[in-house]
Amino acid sequence: MSFTFQILLFSTLPFILALLLLKSWFSSSTSHKNLPPSPPKLPLIGNLHQLGSSPHRALQAMAQTYGPLMLIQLGTVPVLVASSVNAAKEIMKTHDLIFASRPHSNIPNRIFYACKDIAFSQYGEYWRQVKSIAVLHLLSNKRVQSYQHVRDDEMSLMMDKILRADGLVVNLSELLISLTNNVVCRVALGRRYEGREFKKLLERTMELLGCFSVGSYIPSLRWVDQLSGLERKADRVAKEFDEFLEGVLDEHCDKKDDGVEGRDLVDILLEFQRDNSKGFRLERDMIKAIIVDLFTAGTDTTFTSLEWAITELLRNPRAMKELQQEVLEVGQGRSVIAEDDLDKMPYLKAVLKEALRLHIPLPLLVPRESTQDVKLLGYDIQSGTQVLINAWAIARDPSNWEEPEEFRPERFLKSSIDYKGFHFELLPFGAGRRGCPGIQFAMVVNELVLANLVYKFDLALVGEEGLDMSETNGITVHKKCPLLVSATPRS
């Protein structure tokens, strides 16, 4: 050993020892953190292999072993999974601000114009501004009520289609998709877009949002998304949606002012763009992102809720009979059930609550992300942890619900539990700052359509497929087999 090397070694030794002590201190600090229970994980992929095709069911089973608040590893991302009322309440109410942001996600980032929408944008001033526009101007009670004529028109058109089938088999799933799509098109864009290509575009969008992006959880393997064609498909859908929306915006910019009554949601957003007095300017991409948001949230989840509710009624004749008696008493022989009649129907509302409990459209809601370190139910949660609320598991938890797997609407008749985000036993629309702002818009469609269907027709399942309760995979959980029914007009 040379003299020079000895001098170098002894001169750097204190620095090396300091580094080792720091490493030891940080390691000790981490090890002393009280982290939530975690299942064993594999190198690189963590617990990804355990999620399977139905993550909400897999995570429910894991929670039975590791508890209602567990920490799993999806690739390189730590993910906190909440499966109880208390855990959900802590995240969505007590510490709502800390958990109000969204994690970066590859596919939504491509489809929603770098997440300039409401659902996937990160928490901050931009999100506060666009959420405020949605709540005050797009989805307010007054605005939702102003589109009553649209709901009435589309509901009547669907009833006429069923009537013209003259007792033959009706694909009710297809009719419900068309109805919800037409309502959203007319409200958001001012007219219907009924072409098959447009419907397929919406279907492809929802399918992509439900796809697993390897690169979002293992950045070093992002090439897998490229190789599999996932990114290419997302870019193609984004391009097609963009071309469609460019045409819609140009059409709206060129049209004459129809007055306040004739305005659709694009008109309102364009008015905000022109008004610089509010100190926040909506750019063109922002408007398009919000419109895509309205379509994906407004069509898919609404149709899904109706489809499951009708399926459960057909499988439970006693509940169907109870609902029919209620609507007949309220309808009193009139040609239709009007929106003003809906508040007189507690059993109708109970049926929809029970359908939403058993079949939450987004079982894991939209992921959240913690923005700072926080203590949660005694556990240490680090900043940057992704958070999943297993609303599906909470809604089937026997400690919250008697006979949780059974369809029993009457459980809500003497219960104050609602779906508006104040009761954490039932979270189909989320809660807190990131709760869905379109609850009223969705539920008035659900109530109006369901009330009139059972008022005007006796429905019966056709074939064994109708009894199949299998689910599709994706961000929204649909009924796998279409709902095929025979519809006999009630005299």
Image (cartoon, helix red, strand yellow):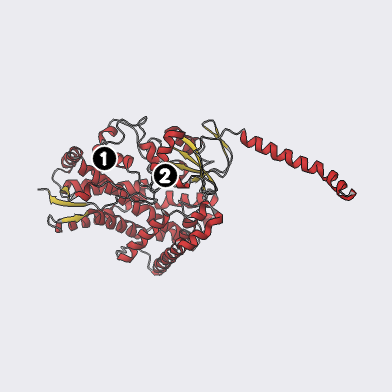
Residue at disc 1, secondary structure = helix
Q: Quadrant of residue 188?
A: bottom left
x, y percent for residue 302: 32, 50
**Residue drawn 69% across the image and 36% down it:** 25
Q: Earlier in the sequence, mark 1 or mark 2?
A: 1
Against 296, residue 81 (above or below) is: above
Q: Residue furthest left?
A: 491
x, y percent for residue 192: 30, 63
Q: Which residue is mark 2?
A: 364
The front one of 9 and 309 is 9
The front one of 139 and 181 is 181
- The label on residue 351 is 1
The front one of 92 and 394 is 394
How dense is the environment of label 1, judged by Cα within 10 Å: few (below 14), some, or many (20 and up)? many
x, y percent for residue 370: 54, 43
Residue at disc 2, secondary structure = loop
**Residue drawn 29% across the image and 47% down it:** 470
**Which amino acid is tagged 2?**
Leu
Q: Residue furthest right?
A: 3
